[in-house]
Amino acid sequence: MSEEYKDENEVKDEAPLEEEPVEETIEPADEQPVEESVAPAQEQPVTAADEVVAPQKTSRKTIMICLLVGTALLVAAAVVACVIWLCGDKGSKHNEVTTVYGDVGYLVDEANFDAQDASVLELSDYSVPDALPNDETMRTVVARGADGEYVLTNADLQIYYWSEYMSFMNSYGAYASYLGLDTTKPLAQQTAMQEGYTWEQFFLESGLNGSGMYYALAQAAKAAEYTLSEEAAAEIADVTDPNGTFATQVLEAGYTDTADFVSKTFGAGAALKNYQNYLETYMLAVDYYSNVMIPAAEATVDDAAAEAYYDENAATYAEGGVLKVNDVDVRHILIQPEGEQDEEGNYSEEAWEAAKEEADRIYALWQESATEDNFAALAQEYSTDEGSKADGGLYENVFPTQMTTEFNDWIFDESRVAGNTDIVKTAYGYHIMYFVGEAETKTWLDNAKTDMTDEALSAAIDELMVQYPLQFNYAKMRLYDMVSANLVTE
């Protein structure tokens, strides 16, 4: 279609990730060795005789007090050594748990789960300058299911957090500065659109909302005994295959290996296994949503219900240009002005006059044989609209506001009937019009059906998130600060 027409509003389909992250060629060990701290060997006590030059008389009571004090000190030292042994690196192993993905996680401050929101930590408290996927900070569990299963570690969290950031930048990157996001400054030091939040907190909360939604959908799929196709399961397994398709794609994209891809995409705190964990939940959730929930919701919406819904919201639809009229089919022949345009893109009066004369000439040619077939033939020969020229100037299933204003007003005039013709001027030229007639499609009805279905799906997801909630421990969440790291290296 030619540029003179307004584009139909695009609807974004929820689809799998465009770019599929890649894993490390060597899988991270499930457990990083933790050195046990050993209490130092107890030194031999130094007797008073070793330090006193000349013996002195000491009362029995004084000796007894010294012995009691010495014994107490030895007991205290033993207790301290025990505490150090338990609370040091060895202590972490007493809090080891296994996540739903089979990874080792550390459970810390269990009482804090679901007790806060993303504003619990101020400014850069979430950010860490260095991270390794297998260090204790990244393996700390920060999300669990209501039934007690451990779902996300900080290493998993990096995937959701940076995916949210990338999604935002892909959609609004060109306007980020207008929204208050400066990519030359750490996210934790900038106020976000959401009042009281930094951009770091904003993306964190968004990422957690996403994780909660995917988790709930995946749990619903499992409860319904829904499984991924063999192809999808193989695609997930391929991520950690150093000789697989995914590894090959990563190399072709310019990364040194899958570990390089994950590090540069999701930060130093994430490993390939964490990306695979994400895909395992994400793909099951999206597949179940697309193949089960959407068809089920659509099946509950018939034409009568959709029309009633439209009527209830007619004013809102009308404000958006969605009118309760059938779509139409129309042919046209576009004659554009020729010659140079001024700085504002306008043609000269002479160019417009010449275009009008040409439109009149072609219109007269059509009137010599006033049939639709002849109109189509003339459109193929003379029209400058490359979007419809090959089809004889035909546009089918046109809905209100799809075309430029003057074009739209002519074809949707209440008096319009099949076979009507005219010449209409728009900012793009002169259009010789031929009204074919009403189409069978009804965009207004389709929009109402879509809106009803979306509302039903949204309510269903909300219910699932209540049924299968994730509980978060915000106080233990940590995020590797990729923005700051990139600023240092640039």
Image (cartoon, rainbow, N blue to C red):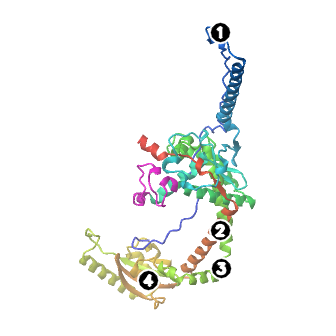
Closer to the chain start, of discs 2 and 1, is 1
241 over 42 or under it: above or below: below
Question: Depth-wise, is mark 3 or mark 1 nearer the camera?
Answer: 1
Q: Amino acid at mark 4?
A: Asn
Read off the residue under disc 2. 294
Tell me if 295 is positioned left or right of 435 in this view.
right
Q: Amino acid at mark 3?
A: Asp
Closer to the chain start, of discs 2 and 4, is 2
Read off the residue under disc 1. 55
Residue 297 percent across, percent down from the top left: 66, 71
Name the quadrant containing residue 489: top left
Residue 235 at least partly seen: no
Residue 475 percent across, percent down from the top left: 59, 49
Distance between the Cα atoms at labels 4 and 3? 41 Å
Closer to the chain start, of discs 3 and 1, is 1
The quadrant of the image that shows the C terminus is: top left
